[in-house]
């Protein structure tokens, strides 16, 4: 289940087994979650989907992105080192681990939930799975599936970062050129790729405002 393909199949299975067929779906993905959304659209009834929001989407050429060029060789050859370092840090007390996170995020307004979630990064098993899946992402998220985008474009909205090293601004301009009628926007607020750390509320407001047009259709 820690493979990229396994995660995609899990999402499809969850929708099919746990969400009633008469319920409209609003799919919101961030980063690799956008790739997962695109992959599941052909496996579920697309009539159920009201809108897909792709926030800071890593849906193509991950290994060629600025961050990908650094991460790819590390994930391919040095995953063992990362796991070993985390294994050593796992013996620290939770108090010391938490203090390390406070030091790392010093000067930033990070919500408590992010600190709590980051504590999992001291679990060698968790980090090993994260790096394994990240390595698969670098290999598999390569060429943009333009046919898939074209099929589902009316239901898709894309939001690119102005300075995003996982999906650089050049990807945004290329998407606008390939799909001139698509709902493809560029962030003007300066939010980071990891907006969930400091701008989750603001992004929530943007998506909510973006969604009003679709919700109004349900009311008529």
Image (cartoon, helix red, strand yellow):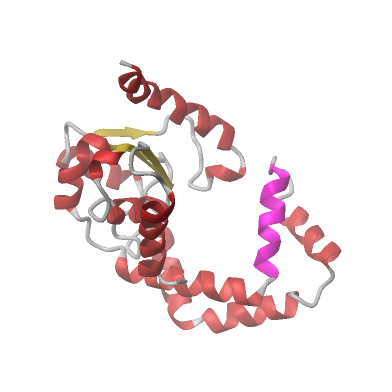
201 with respect to 190 (left or right):
right
In the displayed structure, would residue 103 be above or below residue 197? below
Whether residue 10 appears in this view of the structure is yes
Whether residue 158 appears in this view of the structure is no
Q: Is residue 113 magenta?
A: yes
Q: Please tell me which residue is depicted at 71% across the width and 61% down the height of the picture.
A: 119
Residue 186's image quarter? Answer: top left
In the displayed structure, would residue 102 be above or below residue 24? below
Residue 140's image quarter? Answer: bottom left
Q: Please tell me which residue is depicted at 59% across the width and 72% down the height of the picture.
A: 127
The image shows residue 139 at horizontal and vertical percentages of 33, 71
In the displayed structure, would residue 156 be above or below residue 88? above
Per the picture, the main secondary structure of the magenta-coloured stretch is helix
Compare residues 42 and 116 and report the one nearer the observer.
42
Region in magenta: 110-122
Q: Please tell me which residue is depicted at 47% across the width and 71% down the height of the picture.
A: 2
């Amino acid at each position: 289940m820690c493979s990229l393909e396994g995660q995609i199949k899990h999402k499809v299975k969850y929708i099919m087994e746990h969400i009633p067929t008469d319920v409209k779906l609003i799919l919101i993905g961030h980063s690799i979650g956008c790739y997962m959304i695109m992959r599941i659209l052909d496996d579920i009834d697309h009539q159920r989907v009201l809108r897909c929001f792709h926030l800071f989407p890593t849906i193509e050429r991950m290994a060629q992105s600025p961050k990908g060029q650094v991460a790819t060789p590390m994930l391919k050859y040095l995953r063992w080192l990362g796991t070993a370092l985390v294994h050593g840090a796992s013996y620290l007390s939770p108090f010391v681990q938490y203090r390390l996170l406070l030091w790392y995020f010093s000067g930033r307004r990070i919500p408590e939930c992010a600190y709590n979630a980051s504590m999992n990064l001291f679990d060698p098993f968790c980090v090993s799975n994260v790096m394994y899946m990240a390595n698969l992402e670098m290999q598999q998220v390569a060429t943009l599936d333009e046919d898939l985008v074209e099929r589902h474009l009316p239901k898709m909205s894309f939001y690119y970062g102005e300075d995003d090293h996982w999906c650089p601004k050049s990807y945004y301009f290329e998407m606008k050129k390939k799909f001139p009628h698509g709902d493809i926007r560029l962030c003007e607020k300066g939010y980071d790729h990891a907006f969930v750390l400091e701008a989750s509320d603001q992004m929530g407001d943007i998506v909510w405002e973006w969604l009003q047009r679709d919700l109004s259709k349900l009311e008529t």
